[in-house]
Image (cartoon, rainbow, N blue to C red):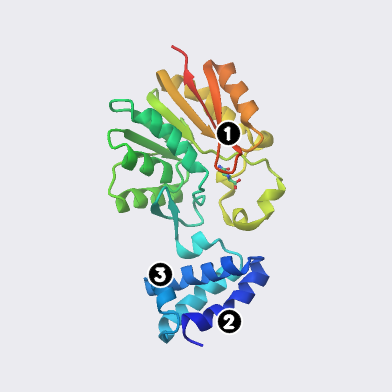
Amino acid sequence: MNSPQELLQRDAPELMRTLALDATAARLEIRILLGQVLSVDRTWLIAHERDSLQAEPIARYEELLGRRLAGEPIAYVLGEKEFYGRTFNVTPDVLIPRPETELLVDLALSQCRVMESPKILDLGTGSGCIAITLVLECPAAQVTAVEESDSALEIARRNAAKNGVHVEFVQSRWFSALGDRQFDIIVANPPYIAPGDPHLLEGDVRHEPAGALVSEDMGLADIREIVVQAKSHLRSKGLHLLEHGYNQAEAVRDLLIKVGFSEPVTRRDLAGIDRVTGAKMSE
Ligand code: GLN
C-alpha cells in the first residue's frame, strides 16, 4: 500500500462515504493532498501513479487525510486556496476565498483601470485576497485594507509579503479607525448570512469564522453599517461595491439609494446568482 494508485484505491471510498463526495472529487482530493506532501503537481502524480512512496510522506498524507475526513475544509488542511489565479495562505482565522468574489474584483478593476492612481479601500479584508489581487492587477492603485481581527490581519500581511505587494493594512472595524479619509473605490465582502441560516450547518462554513459570515438583521446589519458610512468616505463620483447574499440585492440597492448613491446596479456571479451591487456617489 504505498503507490499513489494504491492509496487512491484504499482511501477514495472512505472519502466518498464520509464527505458524500463522488468518485472524481474524492480522487481529486487525494491527489491534491499527495501533491502537497510530495511538492509535485497532479500531472506528475498521474505519470507516477505506480511508483512506491516513502514512509514519511505517506504518514504526512495520512495525517492530512484524517483532518479532511473529520470534516475540515480542504483549504484549511492545505493552508492555502487559489483566488484569481494566485495562491493565498488561509487558516481558520479567515474566510476561505470564494470564486464568486472574483466578480467583485472584476467590477472594481474595470473602474480602477480607467483612473490615474485610484485610492481603493477594502473593508474586512480577511486573507487579503481582494486587496492584494487589486494591487497586482492594477499596480497604479493605492490600496488600503481594514480588518478587525488581529489574527486575520496577520494572515493578510503575510499574503501581501508573499505576493511582493504593498497594501496599507489598518486594524479597524469598518471605517472606525479611518478618520475622515476618502477613497475613489470602496469594496467589501462583509458577513451577510442571517443568524440561524441552515446553510451555516453544512460543509466548509461550519469551520469558518462566524464573524466573517454572520450578520444580524437577516444578514443585513453590517452591510447597512457600511453603506451608511461609505458615503462620507467616497470622493465625488466614487464607486461603492458590495458582495451580498442571493436574496439581498433589492435591499442593498434600496439602502444605497436611501443614503444618496445613484443608479445602483446588481451583477450576477457565474452561477447566475445576484452577488454584487455597486453604485456611484452622486456629484
Ligand atoms: N458566500 C459565502 C457563503 O455563502 C458567505 C460569504 C460572506 O458572508 N461574505 O458561504
Q: For mark 2, give the secondary structure.
A: helix
Q: Earlier in the sequence, mark 1 or mark 2?
A: 2
Q: Which residue is mark 2?
A: 10
Amino acid at pointer 2:
Arg
Residue that label 3 marks: 43
* In this rendering, position of residue 233 left or right of residue 275: left
Quadrant assignment for the C terminus: top left
N-terminal-most mark, 3 or 2: 2
Q: Residues within 10 Å of mark 3 (few under 14, many from 20)?
A: few
Query: In 3D space, how far apart are the residues under numbered discs 3 and 2 (Cα atoms)?
Result: 20 Å
> In percent of the image, x 52 and y 50: which residue is there?
95
Q: Position of residue 129 (x, y in %)?
A: 42, 46
**Label 2, residues with CA under 10 Å away: few <14, some 14-19, many ≥20:** few
Q: Residue at x 42, y 42 (%)?
A: 130
* Residue 150 shown left or right of residue 21 in the figure: left
Which residue is identified by label 1?
Answer: 222
